[in-house]
Image (cartoon, helix red, strand yellow):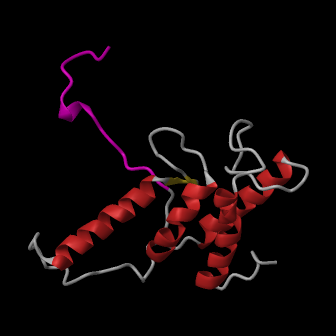
Amino acid sequence: GYPGVLDQSSITSHFIHTDMDTTTGSIQYGPSNDNDPMSNAYLMSYVNHMTRYAALSNYINIPSDCPTRERRGWLGDGQLAAETLIHNFDMASAYTKWLIDIRDTQIQVNASGALPEVAPWYHHGGAAPGDPAWTTAYVNLVYWMWHYYGDERVVN
């Protein structure tokens, strides 16, 4: 056990996430000196701040569904958060890497080419063929990479 009395000064925490640059399109809802917690600008900026931190806490090398439990790259969860991340961070290299993970998992898991539900695949759960609601993440991510970043390499 811990040798002593455990209190706040005994604990150190670190916020861990993939290092992603903030986009210039970050949302600012009012003057930065608006400290009135009841103003709409303050509340919206606070909601945006919480959204950004929630998104970061779910991205450590891959988008995860939950930073406290599974921490796997479920395609469905990743695609639902994708545009929020794109509007707040430069996701070009992170999503290029994840698209490669999805392609590699597709080849590794199923000879038919069916898409998995999770990538990278850790030899259990989420194998191909995946549910269409989840596997459309592959097509959507390719589209968003082209649409938001003009990256035609991922289309080819």
Residue furthest to the front? 132
Q: Residue at x 63, y 66 (%)?
A: 95
Residue 52: quadrant of the picture: bottom left
In this view of the protein, which residue sits in the foreground, 17 or 47?
47
- Say which residue appears at 52% left-offset and 50% top-offset: 65
The answer to whether one can see residue 67 in this image is yes
Residue 100 is a magenta residue: no
The residues colored magenta run 1-17
Figure quadrant of residue 70: top right
> Number of callouts in the render?
0
* In this picture, residue 66 sits left or right of residue 113: left
Rendered-image quadrant of the N terminus? top left
In the rendering, at what x and y percent does residue 125 appear?
68, 38
Q: Is residue 14 magenta?
A: yes
Q: Is residue 97 visible?
A: no
Q: Is residue 41 above or below residue 124?
A: below
Q: Is residue 1 left or right of residue 72?
A: left
Residue 74 rendering spot, x and y as whole percentages: 61, 51
Residue at x-position 10% and y-position 71%: 38
Q: Magenta-highlighted stretch: main secondary structure?
A: loop
Residue at image point 44% right, 73% down: 88
Q: Is residue 142 above or below residue 152?
A: above
Q: Is the C terminus in the top left, top right, bottom left or bottom right quadrant?
A: bottom right
| Residue extending farthest right | 111
Q: Position of residue 121 (x, y in %)?
A: 71, 45
Of residue 75 and residue 134, the one placed in the foreground of this image is 134
- For the residue pair 94 and 112, the one nearer the viewer reads as 112
